[in-house]
Image (tube, rainbow, N blue to C red):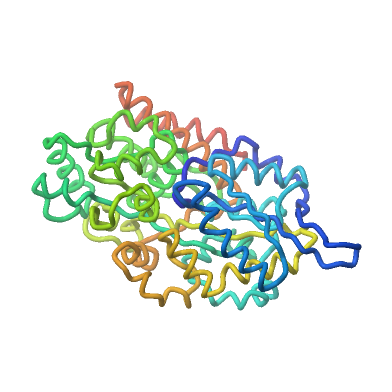
Amino acid sequence: MRSIRAAAVGAVTLSLALAASACGGGSSTGGGSNDEPTTLTYWASNQGASIEIDKKVLQPELDKFQKQTGIKVELEVVPWSDLLNRILTATTSGQGPDVLNIGNTWSASLQATGALLPWDAQNFGKIGGKDRFVASALGSTGAPGKDPAAVPLYSMAYALYYNKQIFADAGIAQPPATWAELTADAKKIQAEGKQALGAEGANVSENIHHVFVFAQQHGARFFTDDGKADFTDDGVVAAVKQYVDLMAADKVIPTGNAEYAQNQSVSDFAKGTTAMLLWQSASANLTSQGMSEDAYGIAPVPVQSGTPGTGTQVNSMVAGINLAVFKNTDNLDGATRFVKFMTSDEEQKILNKAYSTIPPVAGAQNDPAFSAPATAVLKNTLATSAAALPQVADESQFETTVGTAVKELFADAAAGRPVTTASVRAKLEKAQQQMPAK
């Protein structure tokens, strides 16, 4: 989900949202009751290094939309730490925006609230058709067999970012392709007095993204075919332990990173204090912090052995941002026109260039910018070796409970407490008990 995403923890329980009716939009009218609404409210997610950067990216495009349509878009950029709570509160209170960004992994959970406009064939027809969007992005728009709850806006994938100079100083000729190679390279880097790998142990969303990939590589899933949580499967336990062991056993992640939660690991990498970073579409964030694109390389996230691909060679989640409409908006026509504008080929090129993300609209991917080194690895990963997080109604609780379990395990590792198969299983058992009963 994430932009350069930070943690998104839902303190408002989804069970409340499931019982609520859809929320009304926040648009206003220009006069009498028969007038067309002239304003839309839009909650955008924080994609850049700061909210101010997002405003600088988005406001010129919103002004362009107003010039074309006469509809003013009132923008609020919402931090990731607040976004899910704000959305869930809107579904229960009836007070929310007309249009909003959602992390694509939340699509099925928010779909279950009934608050979002379903994108059926008729609605897709209003924005140019469903076939304009790439299949991997559509796979994270809602539960299988149901009309999508949102449409893709930005696509992202995880990659391994590495500092070229630090690698050269350590005598490392190429980035690691497997986890064994990564830990071996990390030891060489640490021998040169540098930190090897950055992580954000207190960032619940980052935790879930990484352990999902490790679980894929262990041939494990967090949910059964009927949507029941299965967090204590041997493969899941092994996956979570392998990720936390990068700090606990391999000691390639600094113990201080157990407390990182808000882009600190990206800042460390941008400053040149950390040699490697596992992050989603980080180039725009790094550039905004003064790091030259020539200073780092981008490679696929490592796998257990061999090369990235499907099945157990998956090395990224299908990350991204979707655009949704509250179905009780009083300006459905304007909201739909805004979605059409934001997902047009022209706007897709502009916005995804600004955020170093990949357009989920196929026609926009032809731009040479999306074949440049900063994005080519991400584009290929999405096409060949990424998988969608579980599209189940309880997905947001899954992120919160399992992501928190991993956070607690990192805290154990940082404090020198043993991280064992038994302790990992116990944390995951606790997380599973917090899930809604099936």
Answer yes or no: is residue 226 visible.
Answer: no
Residue 93 in percent (x, y) is at 76, 43
Residue drawn at x 67%, y 52% as measured from the top left: 112
Image coordinates for residue 29, horizontal then vertical, percent: 82, 60
- Picture quadrant of residue 330: bottom right
Of 240 and 335, the residue lying toward us: 335
Is residue 126 visible in the rendered structure shown here? yes
Query: x, y (%) of residue 12?
Result: 65, 37
Q: Give the image quarter of residue 207.
A: top left
Q: Nearer the viewer, residue 108 or 189?
A: 189
State left or right for residue 248 relative to residue 9: left
68 up-or-down from 137: above or below: below
Identified at 33% across, 71% down, the residue is 371
Task: Give the mark count.
Answer: 0
Q: Relative to 415, does residue 318 appear above or below in the rendering?
A: below
In the rendered structure, the answer to whether residue 96 lies left or right of residue 367 reads right
How far from the left and from the top, in percent, is residue 132? 54, 76
Closer to the camera in the image, 60 or 313:
60
Quadrant position of the C terminus in the picture: top right
What residue is shown at x 51% (from left), y 36% (from top)?
Answer: 401
Residue 179 is left or right of residue 322, and the answer is left
Q: Nearer the viewer, residue 369 or 136?
A: 369
